[in-house]
Amino acid sequence: MKLIVVVLAGTLCQAQISTQVSSVVRPYQAHEVAPISLRNSARIHSVMRAGKIYLSLQDAIALAIENNLDLELNRYGPLLAASAVKRAEAGGPYRGVPSGATQISSVDSGLGVAGSIQAAGLSSGNGGGGGGNNGGAAIQQVGAITPNLDPVLTNSDAFSHITQPFANTVVSGTTELIQAKHTYTTVLQQGLETGGTLQITDYEQYLKENSPSDVLNPAVAPYISATLSHNLLQGFGIGLNTRDIKISKLNLAGSRDTFRSQLLDLVANVQNLYWDLVAANDTVKAREQALEIAKKFYDDTKSEIQIGSLARVQLPGAEAEVGQRQQDLTIAQANVQSQEIRLKDLLIRTEDPAFEEAPIVPMDHIELPAEENIPPLRQLVETAMAKRPDVAVSAVRDKTQVMSSAGTATQLLPTLSVSATITDRSAAGTPQASSGVTPDSSFVGGYGTALGQVFRRDFPSESIKTYINIPFRNRSAQADYTIDAISIRQNEVQGQRDNNQIVVDISNFVIGLRQARSRVSTAIESRQLQEQLLKAEQQKFAFGQTKTTAALIAAQRALVAAQTAEIAALTAYEHARVSLDQVLGLTLETNHVSLDDALAGQVNPAGQANPAGK
């Protein structure tokens, strides 16, 4: 039992250590992006039986969601938007815009020979330190740049052995000054959302040199300083410096709506192609029926000629009718194959010979509902405004553009910044008898003694700096802001124009649906009438009441035309319903497609996804 407790305790301790190590290492690890998959989903094989594809509309939509490469490409949109949010939360310039920040190094004053000269306000040119620009031109983005909001810890250590000629022996006591210098600099910097930067610097310098005039040799001189720099006019404000974070989060929501728009178009395309295939198969059936009628008519004509009821001259017409119907059937079958290829192209991710060669057997058929329950136009418009993804994307675009304009608006202000620094310095070391000077006891010691001076604030320094830049004509900033303001107004006009067009589109599609339904009713009545007329002509021909085949052939052709018109009317009606759902933004809800399932690229096996949601 004790052994089990020890093992469990060890395992728990190991897990905690692993978690702590992981949290430390995680910021420096690259996030893995899953490799692409070119395998078709298993649903393809579930719809295939005995070499045929038994495909319902819901299965077709599910296959397209799981396998369509265009949709797979669009799935990366929200992922990129999520990464953009993380990038914006870090602050700093936009990606690809280099920073023009200056890196500054500090030099201790009053330490050693060179430090003493610098402390006196002189410069020998032999000092070991200095400040400098990192070089390179800065490329500025339009608008205020948010400070880097991720804390950054920087450490720089330098070890040097310097030998230099020194003619002034009064100061150095030697003509050859040899220095061993160690410097350690640690800087912690944190940007502030208000538009400022806080920087804490921990600096230490160790110096040992061969100068007999040094009072302390070797010596150390650590110091700690804190600097707060802040913009007071241009670049000031939490709302301004967090605008990119808010914009990126809005774009993340907008990326889902963009994907929803692409998904909606794909589903509508699959619907239209599926119903086109259903219509093509119905046309084949109608052509087969017409061919059977033509063949029977041909056989009856031959029988009537044999018994002398008809002249032989009537046989070529019946034979030509069979040939015409056979040609119609061949064309209809070729159209089915063409429609299958177009639909399959949306349903597979990579080539699958078994799927490509198998014929599709549609399991759903076009049905005309008993009545059309179409809400009033105003209610349809409200539905479209709430459901259409392009309306949501347009709203996001308008909001982000207004937020972005804050970046150019702040450029209209002068630049006024203030920088306040608090520094606590120290110096300590080993007294050197050759200098002839006995240092104060507070300076005698090592790093601990110097650090005590820092924390006691024995040698405090405070400084405040201000910087102001006032452009007199300011035309560049005014032009940038005006461009943004004009773009906003353009978007407002375009948005209203788009809204007006939505109302027009809805009205047209409602009218189109009603007209399509009316055409279906007319086509059905016409087909039924032609069936009755053909039956009557067949009866006349069977009872010998007609001595020619012209009327019967004409009736057959009229029936074929009526069947074709009915199939076309039903297909047009189904397309009209699909278009109305599409213009209202209801395609996904009507077909029970879940946005989350589509983003994941996997629809549940039943093909009935959860109700769509944003």
Image (cartoon, grey):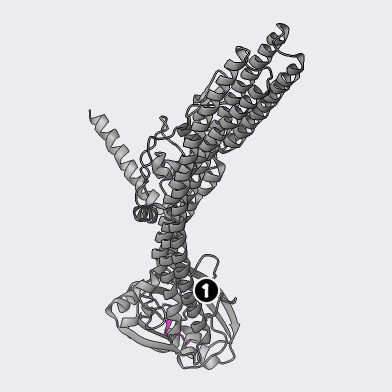
Whether the magenta-drawn stretch holds residue 200 is answered as: no
Image position of 56 with respect to 99: above or below: above
**Within the image, what quadrant is residue 53 found in?**
top right
In depth, the one of 168 and 482 nearer the eye is 482
Whole-percent x, y for residue 367 in the image: 44, 32
Image position of 32 with respect to 555: above or below: below
Quadrant in which the N terminus is drawn: top left
In depth, the one of 47 and 511 nearer the eye is 511
Q: Is residue 149 left or right of residue 134?
A: left
**Within the image, what quadrant is residue 539 found in?**
top right
Q: Residue at x 49, y 29 (%)?
A: 43
Whole-percent x, y for residue 267 in the image: 49, 42
In the picture as drawn, the residue positioned furthest to the top comes out as 307
**Within the image, what quadrant is residue 109 found in?**
bottom left
Image position of 243 with respect to 252: above or below: below
Q: Report whether residue 551 is seen.
A: yes
Tag count: 1
Q: Mark 1: which amino acid? A: Gln
In depth, the one of 229 and 317 nearer the eye is 317
Which structural element holds mark 1? loop
Estimate how packed mark 1 is, as few (under 14), some (14 to 19) or many (20 or more) residues with alpha carbons within 10 Å: few
Image position of 272 with respect to 170: above or below: above
Whether the magenta-drawn stretch holds residue 215 is answered as: yes
Whole-percent x, y for residue 576 in the image: 48, 44
Whole-percent x, y for residue 105 in the image: 48, 77
Magenta range: 213-218
Q: Look at mark 1 in the image and give the residue it sits on.
A: 141
